Image (cartoon, helix red, strand yellow):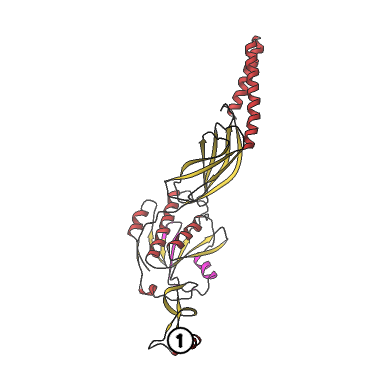
Amino acid sequence: MKSRVIGILATGVLVYNAVLYKSISLAIAGCMSAALLVLASLFLVYRGRTIHVSIQVPIASAECNSPLTVRIHVQNDSFLSCPKFQCRLEQGSSFLRRKRKIWMRGQSALPGENCYDYKMRFTDYGSYRVYLKKVRVYDLTGLFYKDCSVECSAFVQVFPQMQEIGVHITETVNYFWADADVYDDFRPGNDSSELFQVRPFQNGDKIQSIHWKLSAKSDELLVKEVSQPKACPVVFLLDYKSKKQTDVRKVNAYLVILASISFSMMDAGCPHYMVWYSGLRGDVVRLRVDQEESLYLFLSCYLEETFQDGAENLLEAYREKFRGERYLHVLRLDERLEFWKNEDLLVEFTVKNWKKRLGELELVV
């Protein structure tokens, strides 16, 4: 727009001086300048209809402060090359509710399909959408341009860097029994609703455990072993309720703390539920974490959430939704970075000392 305004002003100055001084050369220069403006405008209209741009992120997971490849696809349906173009990207985080605008300069786009790779950095943890909002195409001279609106985006997640902490599992947690939808693949239990395995009869087995139908078919006594439910003895409440969070350092600390505690409990063999109020669903949700895949599934879902006021008391809302559920311990991390176990405040993290306090934390469940 600026170059076009400058071109119009320059043409006006030439025409004015040509009339004022009755100069034929200035009049010719003014006419040539006006013709150039008209031709450039027509060419840019044509160029805007023949250029199609899209965005792609080959690897949708990034590390904080590490470069990530963003690929721009440019389809030039014209027989003429596009000597110059620019793309405006917007980097938006749903977790932090802030956007960052970046202009990326492209090389010439030849007729057909063109691909260009750029490097972007994400300085904070969270779930990001990289939007391609605008493409600026230039004429053959490179002096005049036109902005074309584009609506496409790519998804990127920056997971927090987890720090291992000391977790000590008590015998009560190790041998905790309760109803569950998940069963142990290696140990039999006492849940008669699920069959673990069938094996030959041994001395000491109860008569009630004999599988009579299979025994009659195989001409030997076979015993059925029932399954062991893998209940979650620990419930971890993520009680972050701030709508407007401006301290990015506190948000990053909060995410690293919760991910580190969950990872360390999983690594120590303590299955647990991660519980939070979902603004996307308008309800209390939970995810079971007992292996690495489920940990990253939880982080992926939680990073897409936005901070907002939900249940006034998250524990009461959880008990109301999952009535009759048995568990041993309730952990809670809130927006003040206070970490609670049941009714006891274990650690009060701050923005300045949270790394040191997290490294010194010893969690006994």
- Nearest the camera: 98 or 200? 200
Q: From the top left corner, tell me how far across and down residue 38 is, in percent.
A: 66, 25
Q: Is residue 140 above or below residue 264?
A: above
- Residue at x 35% of width, y 72% of height: 170
The stretch of residues the image draws in magenta is 314-338
For mark 1, give the secondary structure: helix
On screen, residue 355 above or below 18: below
Whole-percent x, y for residue 219 in the image: 46, 88
Tell which residue pokes out farthest to the left in this image. Answer: 360
Q: Position of residue 349 (x, y in %)?
A: 39, 56
In the rendered image, residue 78 lying in the magenta stretch gets the answer: no
Q: Can residue 188 be seen in this snapshot? A: yes
- Residue under label 1, please give it: 209
**Where on the picture, by quarter, is residue 27?**
top right
- The N terminus: image quadrant: top right
Callout 1 environment at 10 Å: few (<14), some (14 to 19), or many (20+)?
Answer: some
Judge by depth and name the residue closer to the eye, 321 or 139: 139
Taking the spot 64% from the left edge, 9% from the top edge, the residue there is: 21
- The residue nearer to you, when weighing 90 against 189, is 189
- Quarter where residue 361 is shown: bottom left
Indicate yes or no whether the magenta region holds residue 325: yes
Residue at 40% over, 64% down:
266
Question: Which quadrant would the C terminus be assigned to in this image?
Answer: bottom left
